Image: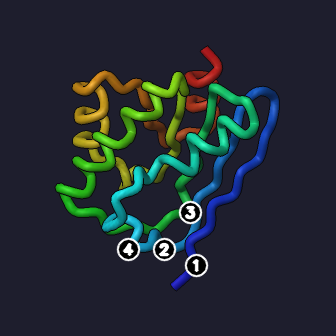
Amino acid sequence: MDEYKQEFQDQDDVLFVRLSGQFPRELLRQQRNLFQPLIDACHAHERKKAIVDARDLQTDFDTMEIFELGESAVTLTRQGLRVALVARQDMIDRLFEDVAFNRGGVIGVFTDMDEARDWVLK
């Protein structure tokens, strides 16, 4: 099993984040927002736009966890961040997008990096 990694790279007014390895389930049980490291990195780099590449991430979220991730993702919008998530097709669950959107979140979910970049730079 590959170790979970988060890599941040500041590039052309956009913060690029690469997630890889097996997502640790213990992070789901913490009270902390899973998107807080992204929020903190955006603030530290003074960026309002981010692209998260999760194509190399291994996950096994259940329905409630996906629902909770959607709720947590709303904090990105509330922080004034425009974030595009890039994932493999098998990772995408419409529930995440619906929950975030229904709570006022604007999070783009893509399988193509170029589409994600175009969307986040709008």
Q: CA distance from mark 3 to mark 2?
A: 9 Å
Type of amino acid at the residue the image marks with label 4: Glu
Who's the residue at 28% across and 47% down the image? 93
Q: Are marks 2 and 1 in contact (CB under 8 Å)?
A: yes
Indicate left or right for 82 with 49 as reference: left
Residue at mark 2 = 22
Which is more foreground, mark 3 or mark 2? 2
Type of amino acid at the residue the image marks with label 2: Gln
The correct choice, above or below, for 119 with respect to 116 in the image is above
Query: How packed is label 1: few (under 14 Cα within 10 Å), some, or many (20 or more)?
Result: few
Q: CA distance from mark 2 to mark 1?
A: 6 Å
Label 3 SS: strand
Type of amino acid at the residue the image marks with label 3: Asp
Residue at mark 1 = 3
Residue at mark 3 = 56
Q: Quadrant of residue 47?
A: top right
The correct choice, above or below, for 7 with respect to 69 in the image is below
Indicate left or right for 26 with 66 as reference: right
Residue at mark 4 = 26
Q: CA distance from mark 4 to mark 1?
A: 13 Å
Q: Earlier in the sequence, mark 2 or mark 1?
A: 1
Who's the residue at 59% across and 24% down the image? 120
Q: Earlier in the sequence, mark 3 or mark 4?
A: 4
Who's the residue at 57% across and 32% down the image? 116
Foreground residue, 91 or 19?
A: 19
Q: Position of residue 49 (x, y in %)?
A: 63, 28
